[in-house]
Image (tube, rainbow, N blue to C red):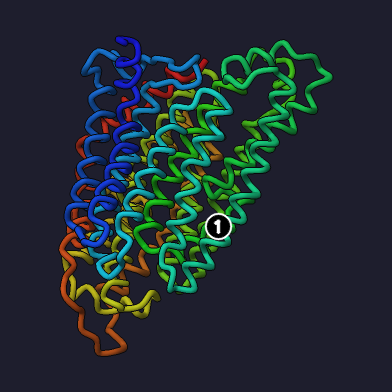
Amino acid sequence: MATLLWGLGALAPALLLALTGLLVLLINAVYPTEDRPTLLAVVSTVGSLASLVAAGALLTGVGGVLSGPEDSVTLYADALVVDGMSLFFSAVFASVTALVVVASYDYLAENPHRAEFYSLTLFAATGMALMASANSLAVAFVALELSSLPSYALVSFLKGNRGSVEAGLKYFLIGALSSAVFVFGISLVYAATGSLLLPAVASGLTEAGAGLAGVAGIGILMVAGGFAFKTASVPFHFWAPEAYEGAPAPVSAFLSSASKAAGFALLFRVFVVGFPLPGADVVASIDWVLLFQILAVATMTLGNFAAATQENVKRMLAYSSIGHAGYALIGLAAWTTADGGAVMGAAMAHLLVYGFMNTGAFLFIALVEHWEVGRTFEDYAGLGARAPMASVAMSVFMFSLAGLPPFGGFFSKYFLFAAAVGAGYWWLAAVGAINSALSLFYYSRVVKALWFDEATTDFELGATPTALYAAVLFAAVATLLLLPGFGPVIETAQAAAAALAP
């Protein structure tokens, strides 16, 4: 009994999200004919924040389950592991979920299916939390599907909107294909190693004969392909602009921040723990560091160049999220046994900052969509005078995403590029810096439209949606508050990543 309670305590961040999703459905079942939007939103927000508090408490050693980010516990025959990295990402998922739930209160004001929306969001976040804790390829696949299936429904949630339904269908079809590739890769790795547990997979690769190098190599490549889809990395990025543009804006924020971070959490653990580089005869011929170097450069460059050519702000943000996936890939692209923890920890810290600034940017678009202003740069002209506080927040997001000082994005990119240089991959940091300079062009176009361009049409904004407005402002404040707290954040992330390294 004590062991069961201990295990439940370690998994509290994921369990709280799942239980809250079930509670939302129960409330909807008890009051099927009554619309209780405030109750549903409050329950969902409280559940998300409780998950955030639980992740923070476990990460700091409260409760005695863990003694710090370097400590870890394994559960259910080692299929799950709770450690600093899983809790760090669980905090990211819970934060983004809470922001999206609050913002959706106004965005879905006319939609009668709020309970379904909140529960799908919470169940997707549950899958993400399990992805961060997966220590088995089987659990990784199940958690990936638990996160993906609600996401498909969320993208096409606006059933009367053709763009939303079309985006959901494309997302589902491409997602199903990538899942097939991913699970086939897992089967090949299992054939070569005889195990699905990540530490046993690593041992199996070390002990396997050279004749299995081809099978293992193809399997690892296919697993990497599945992750490339989840993180919207080249060459499996093409679904992202369509899905993000067609989905409700809060869902775009959720997918581009939390879902992307979940993909990276699983990617980091599987490749560092399951496919270690040193001392593995078979894996030595499979240089996945080189693979991720190619993917990182291609992803950040393609994403930024494509974003620079867009006229639709929402689509621009979709392509820029691909560019940021390229930055995060540096966590593996600059991996070395000596400095891997520093590089990966910096990538984790960047994903945390990215979670706030990118979610805030998409929620601002949700705010503009609520006012029915339009989606192009030209439509945004003059918004600064009509909605100054929200426009200031959007300016903070844009400059932070570009990496300008003194915003959070500058510090996260600085530590990421510095860690890559420290690991000996200065050219990778240089490519990232050049891409960041390019991104300043299209991010500044949004700021120019908000504050300097004259409105081409005479329009008036409607009533201010309080919850959505508050979520945008909170995301901006959180982006700024990360500045004084970035020291502890990067230290925690790097300690967690260093503990993951063999």
**Quadrant of the rendered image containing residue 372:** bottom left
**Quadrant of the rendered image containing residue 345:** top left
Q: Residue at 30% across / 27% down in the picture?
A: 12
Q: Is residue 21 above or below residue 457?
A: above
Q: Residue at 28% across / 84% down in the picture?
A: 455
From the image, which quarter does the N terminus lie in?
A: top left
Residue 406 visible in image: no
Question: Whole-percent x and y of residue 370?
Answer: 28, 72
Question: Whole-percent x and y of residue 121?
Answer: 36, 49
Foreground pick, 443 / 227: 227
Give the residue number, with chain letter if any, for mark 1: 171
Q: Is residue 39 above or below residue 463?
A: above
**Label 1 element class:** helix
Badge 1 crowding class, 10 Å Cα cut-off, few under 14, some 14 to 19, many 20 or more, is: many
Does residue 205 appear left or right of residue 135 in this picture? right
Give the residue type that dot 1 points to: Tyr
Tag count: 1
Foreground pick, 60 / 119: 119
Q: Is residue 103 above or below residue 463?
A: above
**Quadrant of the rendered image containing residue 353:** top left
Question: Whole-percent x and y of residue 488?
Answer: 25, 28
Q: Residue at 27% across / 67% down in the picture?
A: 367
Question: Whole-percent x and y of residue 261?
Answer: 43, 41
Foreground pick, 339 / 345: 345
Does residue 130 appear left or right of residue 140 in this picture? left
Does residue 211 appear left or right of residue 127 in this picture? right
Q: Is residue 208 above or below residue 302?
A: above
